[in-house]
Amino acid sequence: MKPMSLLKKRLNNTEAKKINIVEIFKTVEGEGRWVGLPISFIRLEGCNLRCSWCDTTYSYDGKTYKEMSIDDVIKEVNKFGLKRVCITGGEPFFSPALPELVKGLLKEGYKVFIETNGTLWNNQLEDIINENVYITCSPKPPLYFVHRKLIPYISELKFVIDSKITVKDIVKPEFIDLLKNDIIILQPESNKKDMVEKALEIQDELLKLGIESRIIPQCHKILGLP
Ligand code: SF4
């Protein structure tokens, strides 16, 4: 085989692809519409943002990760024997090997969830995303910016309700099609009581605009799960 063909083969070989992994674990889905179902989590290293209330700062401290091949990541997930796997972070789109990981997991028959802050995109995913990929986008303050190429693929739009967010941050022109689809989640910051009250107020305001939303807490924290 010619050297170029060998190189091409290697680039196409998921075994050759490496990705930085913070942790892989089994739990129940704690947030959003799939809450309560058993699911495996793959936490990728790195994030392009620094949210003040971030509860996974260890995912981008530059120390808490190991480099693994995509094949080894999939082997770890297979050990749990579940149907669903969630790729989280950090910010999953921060990892250049995200498309290879998604492709490998889909090939194994998983329903693949991706939790993203929505600010980044990877063109390679255009050919990979199918009905078995569920993208939860949680836009972050202060801009609540979402990459325009990601928007058509969003399955769920989740807003952390903190002291600063307003209805205007949710009802943005670029989210209009998503707002119509009953996929809006309001998640009170750290399950705080005053943020639950604020979420109820925002839910009422959205309803006046004809927009349904769900208030869902971080259930894994209530249950004491990872
Ligand atoms: S986008 Fe997510 S992981 Fe990144 S800093 Fe914000 S909360 Fe933390």
Image (cartoon, rainbow, N blue to C red):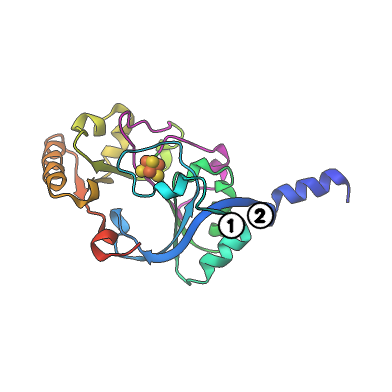
Asked if residue 65 lies in the magenta stretch, the reply is no
Establish whether ligand 1 lies closer than 8 Å to the Cβ of label 1. no
Q: Quadrant of ligand 1?
A: top left
Q: Amino acid at mark 1?
A: Gly
For the residue pair 121 and 211, the one nearer the viewer reads as: 121
Taking the spot 39% from the left edge, 37% from the top edge, the residue there is 50
Across and down, in percent, residue 5 comes to: 82, 47
Give the SS element for disc 1. helix
Label 2 packing within 10 angstroms: few (<14), some (14-19), many (20+):
some
Taking the spot 34% from the left edge, 49% from the top edge, the residue there is 55
Apparent side of residue 208 relative to residue 114 in the rendered image (left or right): left
Stretch in magenta: 118-147
For the residues labelled 2 and 1, the Cα–Cα distance comes to 7 Å
Taking the spot 70% from the left edge, 49% from the top edge, the residue there is 12
Q: Which mark is residue 104?
A: 1
Q: Are marks 2 and 1 in contact (CB under 8 Å)?
A: yes
Q: Which residue has dot 2 on it?
A: 14
Q: Name the residue at the right extreme.
A: 2
Across and down, in percent, residue 104 comes to: 58, 57
Asked if residue 145 lies in the magenta stretch, the reply is yes
Q: Does the magenta stretch mainly form a helix, a strand or a loop?
A: loop
Q: In the rendered view, would you say 170 is above or below 213? A: above
Q: Quadrant of residue 178?
A: top left
Give the SS element for disc 2. helix
Apparent side of residue 221 relative to residue 208 in the rendered image (left or right): right
Q: Amino acid at mark 2?
A: Thr
Label 1 packing within 10 angstroms: few (<14), some (14-19), many (20+):
some
